[in-house]
Image (tube, grey):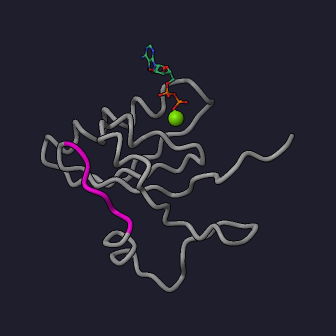
């Protein structure tokens, strides 16, 4: 099952995602929770230790103008390299993180 949660900022997407991820995992489902927000905070919301939150490396290639999934890595390699163990057995992945704010 794949679940995508999107919508306007501040409506509770991250909160719902965190609770859903942990609850599904506790019930025995294999959960890979992917934060696709460029201002990510799912890791903190699932309860990952504060010192770990800042250490997560995003899996999207952010070297150019356009971010993309590295084409030379298979999904299982991506998971092995960029998946982090989270509370209740979830695997957490971070898509991107804005390095600095732009203008406008
Ligand atoms: N059901 C709710 N009732 C009250 N406050 C909530 C609820 N869900 C989320 N919040 C709060 O609203 C704020 C925004 O939630 P968040 O999950 O970060 O939204 P989003 O990811 O959509 O931007 C947070 O401070 C969160 O604690
Ligand atoms: Mg959010």
Residue 27, picture quadrant = top left
Q: Position of residue 5 (x, y in %)?
A: 48, 40
**Residue at the outermost right position:** 104
Residue drawn at x 70%, y 50% is 100
**Residue at the outermost bottom position:** 72
In this view, 64 is above or below 83: below
Q: Position of residue 44 (x, y in %)?
A: 38, 37
Q: Is 85 part of what is drawn in magenta?
A: yes
Residue drawn at x 72%, y 67% is 66
Q: Quadrant of the C terminus?
A: top right
Residue 25, picture quadrant = top left
Return the residue nearer the eye: 20 or 35: 35
Q: Position of residue 8 (x, y in %)?
A: 63, 30
Return the residue nearer the eye: 100 or 90: 100
Residue drawn at x 54%, y 77% is 70
In this view, 43 is above or below 57: above
- Number of numbered markers: 0
Left or right: residue 48 compared with residue 62: left
Q: Is 4 part of what is drawn in magenta?
A: no
Left or right: residue 70 compared with residue 99: left
In this view, 85 is above or below 101: below
Left or right: residue 69 compared with residue 64: left
Q: Which residues are magenta?
A: 82-87
Q: Position of residue 28 (x, y in %)?
A: 13, 48
Residue drawn at x 58%, y 43% is 39
């Amino acid at each position: 099952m794949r679940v995508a949660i999107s919508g306007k900022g501040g409506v509770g997407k991250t909160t719902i995602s965190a609770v859903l991820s942990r609850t599904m995992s506790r019930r025995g489902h294999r959960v890979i929770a992917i934060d696709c927000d460029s201002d990510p905070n799912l890791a903190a919301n699932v309860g990952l230790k504060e010192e770990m939150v800042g250490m997560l490396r995003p899996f999207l290639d952010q070297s150019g103008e356009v971010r993309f999934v590295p084409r030379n890595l298979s999904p299982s390699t991506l998971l092995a390299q960029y998946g982090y163990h989270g509370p209740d057995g979830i695997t957490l992945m971070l898509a991107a993180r804005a390095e600095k704010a732009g203008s406008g």
